Image (cartoon, rainbow, N blue to C red):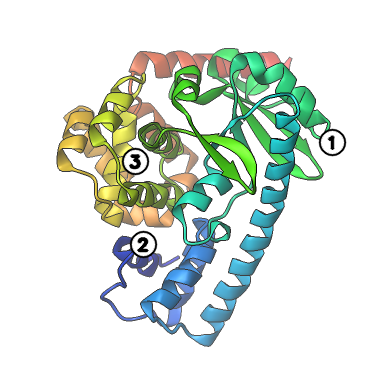
């Protein structure tokens, strides 16, 4: 999969790329990479903005994948609005994480960014009421992270049904043997709306930290996550608050992985001093440069190699001890589950 044209398109945005439109195998690679990274709809838009004329077959494939992606997002949007209504009936206004709500605020059209589920953050004290409300939509709780990892390493419940999947977060994030709790984030959240329904958004600087941690926890293997960071930066951020917010977590330099890649690969406007303040030790910066090289990120190489994925998670972990304890808990949980 030749993803160089995709990299050029995302790097130049919101300006047109200086290079010529791709042809032949490179044009096909652009479309396949856009689909793989969850950006087919946006890329169709950006290609038109750039004045690129793709070969007929590549253009047709991009159009078809863009429409299919939009249809999937519409399905998620329908579940989202029903979920918000159900939660409102029990007095709960959640923080909407990632997905459709983020695309609504950052992209030219929210249907341009792939979204597969609904992510909602509520206070721990609201979880039981929220679950009861959501099960009224025909969703049922299935064994998710709590069953696989145990409470210490879990951050959400999964509710699934014919309408799709809702991830009900009681923590914002769990990964690398650490957790990003949600209470403080909820306390600083701001009011918003989706299709006339009340929601809350993370404060922009909190969202900058959360999105970088989330992307890095998944080893930056989907360029949509990295591009989200660029689009958020283009809207303007209080970078001092971003640094303070990242340092207030258990894994500040994990945020560095995401923001450094966004600046290097996609030319996101991230101040150098921000990266300097969040940077991990030099040896981890060197390893990150190898694991997260432009070529490897464009090709999602780590996602295709379990040994490389495990090595990256272990070597780039913010705290070796916490990661080792997490790995041991995973083994113990797997042994118990096999009995």
In this rendered view, identify the residue nearer to me: 186 or 247.
Answer: 186
Query: What residue does disc 3 label?
Result: 258
In this rendered view, identify the residue nearer to me: 209 or 189.
Answer: 189
Q: Position of residue 279 (x, y in %)?
A: 22, 31
In the displayed structure, 292 sits above or below 326; it is below
Q: Could you tell me how far apart the alpha carbons at marks 3 and 1 are, in whole angstroms? A: 37 Å
In the displayed structure, 265 sits above or below 219; it is below
Q: Contact (CB < 8 A) between labels 1 and 2?
A: no
N-terminal of the pair, mark 3 or mark 1, is 1
Q: Secondary structure under badge 2?
A: helix
Q: Position of residue 339 (x, y in %)?
A: 74, 14
Q: Contact (CB < 8 A) between labels 3 and 1?
A: no
N-terminal of the pair, mark 3 or mark 2, is 2
Q: Secondary structure under badge 3?
A: helix
Residue drawn at the location 66% of the way across and 18% of the way down: 126
Point out the image quarter for the N terminus: bottom left
Q: Could you tell me how far apart the alpha carbons at marks 1 and 2 are, in whole angstroms? A: 39 Å
Q: Contact (CB < 8 A) between labels 3 and 2?
A: no
Q: Position of residue 334 (x, y in %)?
A: 63, 19
Q: Nearer the viewer, mark 3 or mark 1?
A: 1
In the displayed structure, 16 sits above or below 39; it is below
Residue drawn at the location 48% of the way across and 85% of the way down: 55
Does 210 sit left or right of 142 as displayed?
left
Query: What residue does disc 2 label?
Result: 10
Query: What residue does disc 1 label?
Result: 138
Instruction: Determine which quarter of the picture holds residue 206.
Output: top left
């Amino acid at each position: 999969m030749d993803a160089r044209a995709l990299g050029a398109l995302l790097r130049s945005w919101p300006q047109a790329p200086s290079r010529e439109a791709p042809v032949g195998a490179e044009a096909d690679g652009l479309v396949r990479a856009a689909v793989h990274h969850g950006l087919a709809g946006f890329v169709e838009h950006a290609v038109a903005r750039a004045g690129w004329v793709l070969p007929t077959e590549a253009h047709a494939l991009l159009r078809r994948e863009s429409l299919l992606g939009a249809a999937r997002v519409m399905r998620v949007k329908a579940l989202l609005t029903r979920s918000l209504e159900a939660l409102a009936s029990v007095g709960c206004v959640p923080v909407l994480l990632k997905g459709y709500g983020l695309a609504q605020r950052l992209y030219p059209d929210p249907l341009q960014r792939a979204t597969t589920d609904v992510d909602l953050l509520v206070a721990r004290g609201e979880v039981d009421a929220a679950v009861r409300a959501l099960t009224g939509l025909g969703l049922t709780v299935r064994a998710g992270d709590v069953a696989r990892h145990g409470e210490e390493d879990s951050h959400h419940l999964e509710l699934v049904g014919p309408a799709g999947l809702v991830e009900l977060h009681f923590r914002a994030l769990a990964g690398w043997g650490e957790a990003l709790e949600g209470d403080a984030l909820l306390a600083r959240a701001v009011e918003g709306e989706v299709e006339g329904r009340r929601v809350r958004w993370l404060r922009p600087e909190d969202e900058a930290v959360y999105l970088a941690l989330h992307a890095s926890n998944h080893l930056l293997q989907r360029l949509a996550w990295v591009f989200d960071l660029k689009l958020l930066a283009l809207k303007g951020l209080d970078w001092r608050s971003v640094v303070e917010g990242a340092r207030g977590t258990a894994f500040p330099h994990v945020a560095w992985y995401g923001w450094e890649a966004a600046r290097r690969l996609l030319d996101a406007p991230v101040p150098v001093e921000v990266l300097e303040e969040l940077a991990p030790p030099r040896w981890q910066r060197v390893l990150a440069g190898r694991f997260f090289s432009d070529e490897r990120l464009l090709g999602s190489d780590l996602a295709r190699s379990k040994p490389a994925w495990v090595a990256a998670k272990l070597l780039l972990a913010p705290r070796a001890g916490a990661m080792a304890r997490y790995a041991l808990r995973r083994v113990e949980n797997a042994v118990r589950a096999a009995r």
